[in-house]
Image (cartoon, rainbow, N blue to C red):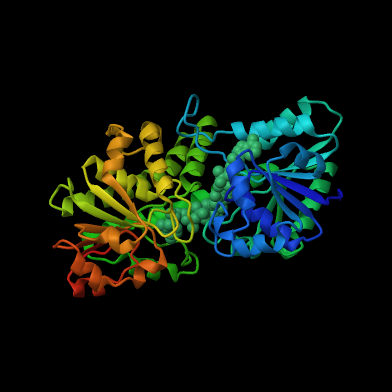
């Protein structure tokens, strides 16, 4: 195999940072450099105080503390990192396009293309390029085409090595991966490159969990895995609506079907809707690819997973408005949670953004508490939505007019104390499943609220019986009377 003693990763985000930190921890002989164009992000990765790392993941700061400065480096010097590495991971963002052809559907590959061009320009010896970002099928071909067009005498091999970590559990997912997937080209040089990457993972991943496939299968497996996972959430969420109408309990249904080993019990938690930077983006990307290859039935099938998710978010905000006597104008609604799931500070595509938006359209006053998300992030999420409303909404909220940030700032308040957020509130909406919400003094919260005191549990984490006994008017996803 190719001799690899130095690797680098372009993109120091939610994937690049933790992935490289774990490789550095497990392979102390390997020099690992993570580079990014974002100076602030790199400075945060280098911050003496580990509380200031740019992303929050349980266990991450310990891994960084162990490896940083030893064989793990964060830098903005992309040129040097490319020069001295034999293997280069591309882990840049691939968001949904917000302009032009494929707007609102296709993956925007401009950052990936830029990386390929930069590598080709700088490289002075052979390199292995590893696609870590989630990409449409056959992107490796485009990358190769760019690389080979430079004709600088260097050989470039492209591997696909999609990342399956979930946020909030990134470190344990990386350390105990169900599988590592490596796609390579079917020739001698491709196999040698593949062997070099297998060598790295073999330091801690059992050989039988390292899957080797054709490069196109690997690229497509990533989109497919996310589509299947999201489909499970949309499936149980679809049933949650029926449960509410029929007096069934969605958690009981999930438990009953999950005991069937063919179905399995994981990923059947009904919620206010899935969020995160991946599910919606990757399904839309898959749908776009299917339409591109003239497979409209397949495209429609997967698109429905996203429609159902929009429906679930909309259903929740509508429930709040309906229950509060058909208007939330001037009413104080407390949000517990803003992140798209617990144990992360990531808010991309979080359901809470869309719930807030619908309530703001009805002139609600929203008071938000999240243990890890900053005020600045919350306002930037709301602003992003105002600017991208038509591209991102598939459901009927696209009819809404964009709101001015002045107005939003008047109506939205961010708190560092949860009790202050809920003080004199008309209603509480639980939007993220943070464990600490369960430990609050709910008696005290009840006393402090306006009556009737409503709770809308979008995660089913609070005990309905306990809240009912205290006197709350409770609504839970998927729990009929
Ligand atoms: P991110 O936005 O957190 O990080 C991407 C980083 O790349 C940013 O810091 C950005 O500044 C940097 N970047 C962009 N262009 C650059 C360039 N030309 N040179 C140097 N740096 C550049 O994104 P992320 O969540 O880490 O996701 C990265 C990829 O991994 C995406 O394709 C995503 O779909 C995929 N993925 C994400 C997850 C997840 O849980 N977040 C999981 C699996 C796969
Ligand atoms: C996902 C995939 O799980 C991961 O393999 C991939 O690499 C990236 O995308 P992530 O988005 O970080 O990971 O988190 P995940 O745990 O999958 O949750 C996604 C969303 O679905 C969250 O909003 C979560 O709250 C929601 N969800 C998940 C449910 O509503 N119910 C469930 O049962 C599971």
Viewer-nearest residue: 113 or 216: 113
User: Is any atom of residue 311 visible in this view?
Assistant: no
Picture quarter with the C terminus = bottom left
Lateral position of residue 210 relative to residue 94, left or right: right
Percent x, y of residue 299: 46, 38
Instruction: State which quadrant residue 19 falls in.
Output: bottom right
Viewer-nearest residue: 361 or 209: 361
Lateral position of residue 324 relative to residue 170, left or right: left
Q: Ligand 1 quadrant?
A: top right
Check the image and report above or below for 379 versus 51: above
Instruction: State which quadrant residue 398 falls in.
Output: top left
Residue that appears at 17% across and 47% down: 330
Percent x, y of residue 172: 60, 65
**Number of numbered markers:** 0
Instruction: State which quadrant residue 432 falls in.
Output: bottom left
Viewer-nearest residue: 331 or 292: 331
Lateral position of residue 383 relative to residue 45, left or right: left
Check the image and report above or below for 272 versus 250: above
Percent x, y of residue 430: 32, 59
Residue that appears at 39% across and 68% down: 436
Percent x, y of residue 406: 30, 36
Residue that appears at 24% across and 67% down: 445
């Amino acid at each position: 195999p190719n001799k690899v003693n130095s690797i680098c990763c372009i993109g120091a985000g939610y994937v690049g940072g933790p992935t490289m930190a774990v490789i550095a921890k497990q392979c102390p002989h390997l020099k690992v450099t993570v580079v990014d164009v974002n100076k602030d992000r790199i400075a945060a990765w280098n911050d003496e105080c580990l509380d200031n790392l740019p992303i929050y993941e349980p266990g991450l700061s310990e891994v960084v503390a162990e490896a940083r400065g030893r064989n793990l480096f964060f830098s903005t010097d992309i040129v040097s990192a490319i020069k001295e590495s034999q293997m280069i991971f591309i882990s840049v963002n691939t968001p949904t396009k917000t302009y032009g052809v494929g707007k609102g559907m296709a993956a925007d590959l401009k950052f990936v293309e830029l990386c390929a061009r930069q590598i080709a320009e700088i490289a002075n010896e052979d390199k292995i390029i590893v696609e870590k970002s989630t990409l449409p099928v056959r992107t490796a071909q485009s990358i190769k085409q760019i690389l080979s067009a430079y004709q600088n005498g260097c050989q470039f091999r492209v591997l696909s090595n999609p990342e399956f970590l979930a946020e909030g559990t990134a470190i344990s997912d990386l350390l105990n991966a169900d599988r590592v997937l490596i796609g390579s080209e079917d020739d001698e040089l491709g196999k040698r490159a593949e062997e070099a990457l297998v060598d790295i993972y073999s330091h801690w991943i059992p050989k039988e969990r390292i899957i080797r496939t054709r490069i196109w299968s690997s690229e497509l497996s990533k989109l497919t895995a996310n589509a299947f996972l999201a489909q499970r959430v949309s499936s149980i969420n679809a049933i949650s609506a029926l449960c509410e109408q029929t007096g069934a309990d969605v958690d009981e249904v999930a438990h009953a079907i999950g005991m069937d080993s063919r179905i399995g019990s994981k990923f059947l938690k009904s919620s206010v809707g899935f969020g995160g930077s991946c599910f919606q983006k990757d399904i839309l990307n898959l749908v776009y690819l299917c339409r591109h290859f003239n497979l409209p039935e397949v495209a429609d099938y997967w698109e429905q997973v996203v429609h159902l998710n929009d429906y679930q978010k909309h259903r929740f905000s509508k429930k709040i408005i309906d229950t509060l006597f058909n208007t939330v104008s001037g009413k104080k609604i407390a949000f517990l949670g803003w992140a798209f799931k617990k144990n992360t500070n990531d808010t991309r595509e979080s359901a809470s953004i869309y719930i807030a938006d619908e309530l703001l359209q009805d002139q609600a006053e929203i008071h938000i508490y999240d243990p890890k998300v900053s005020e600045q992030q919350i306002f930037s999420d709301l602003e992003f939505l105002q600017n991208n409303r038509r591209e991102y909404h598939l459901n009927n909220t696209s009819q809404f007019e964009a709101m001015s940030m002045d107005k939003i700032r008047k109506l939205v308040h961010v708190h560092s104390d949860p009790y202050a957020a809920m003080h004199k509130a008309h209603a509480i909406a639980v939007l993220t499943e943070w464990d600490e919400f369960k430990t609050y003094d709910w008696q005290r919260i009840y006393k402090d609220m306006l009556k009737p005191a409503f709770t809308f549990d979008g995660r089913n984490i609070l005990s309905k019986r306990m809240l009912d006994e205290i006197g709350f008017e409770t609504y839970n996803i998927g729990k009929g009377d």
